[in-house]
Image (cartoon, rainbow, N blue to C red):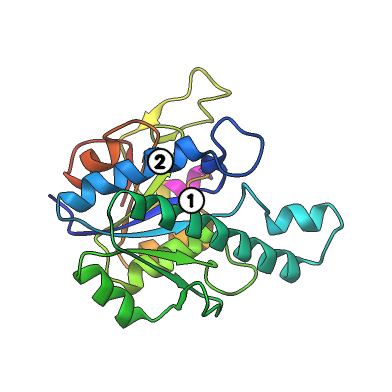
């Protein structure tokens, strides 16, 4: 395989599948099968997953429910629920896993310890990072970039429901054109919604490439890890 260690970022919304909220078991099982393929091929896999299918901090604030910091903490807890569900699905397919949380909850997850996470990866375990960065005002995109840099991953893979980065939203604009490769600077200049600016800047400063690809197409994750020209590469 071209890449030895990857950080896979999954959105919470993707877990909804055809549902209006919550977790679609079929999507969860599909993702577990995709991860198993790359683990069996010898790739070390770490995963960061969002919580938007359950609760988003910004959503709580805009609805007048809570203030921003409180809402973000609620969103972090939602990511842990998704991480536990994903952990169960991965273990169902025989993979060894460890769940590390940026917020201490010893009964269900290890605390995030960088050296320990790297050791788990070296032993072939899938490491799932929950609770974002553990701080409000930071997205799970930023958490993914931060953890990727910390564990010395080869690249960040952002699994979405579209097959890369386009000049416009391909679901709204039929004339949108997909990029095969794009620079960080061009992402800034065009204002493309790849990841939030903090996450992009973190990757740029640490020379960490990002590949945005369609996670729902079977075999795509393995193809990316093997160096195939899938999705869009930001570098």
Q: Which residues are magenta?
A: 187-192
Q: Residue at x 47, y 61 (%)?
A: 199
The residue that appears at 12% across and 49% down in the rendered structure is 1
Q: Residue 164 in the image: x percent, y percent?
A: 39, 36
Residue at image position (62%, 44%) is 22
* Residue 72, x across and y down, in percent: 68, 65
Task: Say whether residue 191 is magenta.
Answer: yes
Q: Is residue 67 above or below residue 222?
A: below
User: From what the image shows, is residue 77 above or below residue 21?
Assistant: below
Give the residue pinned by disc 2. 29
- Tell me the CA gap for discs 1 and 2: 35 Å
Tell me if mark 2 has few (under 14), some (14-19) or many (20+) residues whose alpha carbon lies within 10 angstroms of its own: some
User: Which callout, 1 or 2, points to the residue nearer the camera?
Assistant: 2
Measured from the top left, where is residue 203 in percent x and y? 38, 62
Q: Is residue 110 magenta?
A: no
Quadrant of the rendered image containing residue 148: bottom left
Residue 182 appears in view: no
Residue located beneath label 1 in the image:
188
């Amino acid at each position: 395989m071209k890449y030895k260690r990857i950080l896979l970022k999954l959105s919470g919304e993707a877990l909804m599948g055809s549902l209006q909220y919550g977790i679609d078991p079929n999507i969860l099982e599909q993702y577990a099968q995709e991860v198993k393929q790359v683990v069996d091929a010898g790739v070390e896999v770490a995963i960061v997953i969002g919580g938007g299918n359950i609760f988003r901090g910004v959503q709580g604030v805009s609805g007048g429910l809570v203030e921003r910091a409180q809402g973000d903490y609620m969103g972090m807890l939602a990511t842990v629920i998704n991480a536990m569900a994903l952990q169960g699905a991965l273990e169902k397919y025989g993979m060894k896993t460890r769940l590390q949380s940026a917020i201490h909850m010893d009964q269900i997850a290890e605390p995030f310890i960088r050296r320990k996470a790297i050791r788990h990866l070296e032993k072939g375990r899938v490491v799932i990072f929950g609770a974002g960065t553990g701080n409000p005002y930071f997205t799970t995109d930023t958490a993914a970039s931060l953890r990727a840099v910390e564990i010395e991953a080869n690249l960040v893979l952002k699994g979405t429901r579209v097959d890369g980065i386009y000049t416009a939203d391909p679901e709204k604009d039929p004339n949108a054109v997909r990029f095969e490769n794009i620079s960080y600077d061009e992402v800034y200049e065009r204002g493309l919604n790849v990841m939030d600016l903090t996450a992009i800047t973190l990757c740029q400063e640490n020379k960490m490439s990002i590949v945005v690809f369609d996670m729902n197409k079977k075999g795509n994750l393995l193809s990316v890890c093997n160096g195939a020209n899938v999705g869009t590469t930001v570098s």
